[in-house]
Image (cartoon, helix red, strand yellow):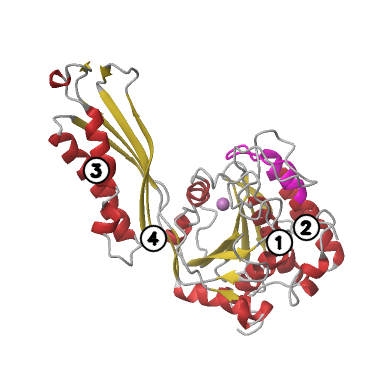
């Protein structure tokens, strides 16, 4: 079958039977309609409307707005007094011009679901459908969260109070390195922190032929970048993941002028809170000290992004149990290398126990470009991962709520 038609046989055994053809078709349609109409962070209005309709379509009636363009649905459990469990799917897209050639490619020029959030939102609806059909022990809150790409949505949901009293939260991300049917559900770090620095070095310009009359920021910038790049190999334990990347370097306009000032911008990533604070403090310290060596003034600004996402032990174990129960013992995949991208689910994990999964979504034929990962204009997530994600999240929530097979 063509990818446009969907391939029921490509949905792994153990998951397929949970989705009767009618529900399967509706979920595929939802995913494609989200993919076709992507919206940027905080602009997910049509997305919000589509998702509210989709929830109603699968008999989830208690739905309200959260965090401006998000939704939270409550699926009643058997014991309404018990503390609820939450499932989160993110909904925003990226400012990328789609080049996948998919029949349901973006119709919003310059905006694309290049991070799989169309699939994540559909997982959440799929899980809601399963939980509405067969209630868990406790209520389950399904959060459709906006603005993940700006790392603002999770905080807005938390600030709204919608998740007060929640005992555990679960979510996931499509993983194009893993085939459909394999899932990473590990305890400990699952995504890195992401902080951003802007360092301005101020000196005094001069004629380029009279550098002795300047306080030149250019050699300082060169030295600053190489010193920043010595931080991870020299300050972190060799087994401790960390990244310092300079991504903007700017100074000067002319061939014959020493400029007054220069700027370095970049990002710091770490999977452990201690490594994160050490690297961020070191970036600031090194900037000051290089500036002093070169008789310059440093202005250092650090913008804190997401913290590391760290899965809790019990919740990760529930997720693994859900994965093996649905897909077999071999379905649990190891995360061979730490993922150094940030994920705003980390904010929930600072507040409550939970687990964030990586759910296999490699396109069956690799899509048009087998090497295209997330944030690429050619990124394609396998639609069949939709059913795995929905089933795994529903089963995990059910286990966390104290019911379901095996509990
Ligand atoms: Ni993402």
In the rendered image, residue 192, in percent from the top left (x then y), is placed at 42, 57
The CA span between labels 3 and 4 is 19 Å
Label 3, on which residue?
284
Side (left or right) of 9 relative to 249: right
Local packing at callout 4 (Cα closer than 10 Å; few below 14, some 14-19, many 20+) is many
The CA span between labels 1 and 2 is 8 Å
Side (left or right) of 283 relative to 183: left
Residue 34 in the magenta stretch? The answer is yes
The CA span between labels 3 and 1 is 43 Å
Image point (60%, 46%), residue name: 376
Local packing at callout 3 (Cα closer than 10 Å; few below 14, some 14-19, many 20+) is some
Label 1, on which residue?
386
Most distant residue in the front direction: 209
Number of callouts in the render? Answer: 4
Name the one closer to the observer, 137 or 296.
Answer: 296
Local packing at callout 2 (Cα closer than 10 Å; few below 14, some 14-19, many 20+) is many
Sequence order check, earlier mark of 1 and 2: 2
Local packing at callout 1 (Cα closer than 10 Å; few below 14, some 14-19, many 20+) is many
Task: Tell me the mark number nearer the camera, choosing from 3 and 2.
Answer: 3
Q: In what element is the residue under mark 3?
A: helix
Segment colored magenta = 32-48
Q: In what element is the residue under mark 1?
A: helix
Question: Quick check: 97 above or below 277?
Answer: above
Label 2, on which residue?
27
Label 4, on which residue?
271
Sequence order check, earlier mark of 2 and 4: 2
| Quarter assignment of residue 28 | bottom right
Side (left or right) of 195 relative to 174: left
Sequence order check, earlier mark of 3 and 2: 2
């Amino acid at each position: 079958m063509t990818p446009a038609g969907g391939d029921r046989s490509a949905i792994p055994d153990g998951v397929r039977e949970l989705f009767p053809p009618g529900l399967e078709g509706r979920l595929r349609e939802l995913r494609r309609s989200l993919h076709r109409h992507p919206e940027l962070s905080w602009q997910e209005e049509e997305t919000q409307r589509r998702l509210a309709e989709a929830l109603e379509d699968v008999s989830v009636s208690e739905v309200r707005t959260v965090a401006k363009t998000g939704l939270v649905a409550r699926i009643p459990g058997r014991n309404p007094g018990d503390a609820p469990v939450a499932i989160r799917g993110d909904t925003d897209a990226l400012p990328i011009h789609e080049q996948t050639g998919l029949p349901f490619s973006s119709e919003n020029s310059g905006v694309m679901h290049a991070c799989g959030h169309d699939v994540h939102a559909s997982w959440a609806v799929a899980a809601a459908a399963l939980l509405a059909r067969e209630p868990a022990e406790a209520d389950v809150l399904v959060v459709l969260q906006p603005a993940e790409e700006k790392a603002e949505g999770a905080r807005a949901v938390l600030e709204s109070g919608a998740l007060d009293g929640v005992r555990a939260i679960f979510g996931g991300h499509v993983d194009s390195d893993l085939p459909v049917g394999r899932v990473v559900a590990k305890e400990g770090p699952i995504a890195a922190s992401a902080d951003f620095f802007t360092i301005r070095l101020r000196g005094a310009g001069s004629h380029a032929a009279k550098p002795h009359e300047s306080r030149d920021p250019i050699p300082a910038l060169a030295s600053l970048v190489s010193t920043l790049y010595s931080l991870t190999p020299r300050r972190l334990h060799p087994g401790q993941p960390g990244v310092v990347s300079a991504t903007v370097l700017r100074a000067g306009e002319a061939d014959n002028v020493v400029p007054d000032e220069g700027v370095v911008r970049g990002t710091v990533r770490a999977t452990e809170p201690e490594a994160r604070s050490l690297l961020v403090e070191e970036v600031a310290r090194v900037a000051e000290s290089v500036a002093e060596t070169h008789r310059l003034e440093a202005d250092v600004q650090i913008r804190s992004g997401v913290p590391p996402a760290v899965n809790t032990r019990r919740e990760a174990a529930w997720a693994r149990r859900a994965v093996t129960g649905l897909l077999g013992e071999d379905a649990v995949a190891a995360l061979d290398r730490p993922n150094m991208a940030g994920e705003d689910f980390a904010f929930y994990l600072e507040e409550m126990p939970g687990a964030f999964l990586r759910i296999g979504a490699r396109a069956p034929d690799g899509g048009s470009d087998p090497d295209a990962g997330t944030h690429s204009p050619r990124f394609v997530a396998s639609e069949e991962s939709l059913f795995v994600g929905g089933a795994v999240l529903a089963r995990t929530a059910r286990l966390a709520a104290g019911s379901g097979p095996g509990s």
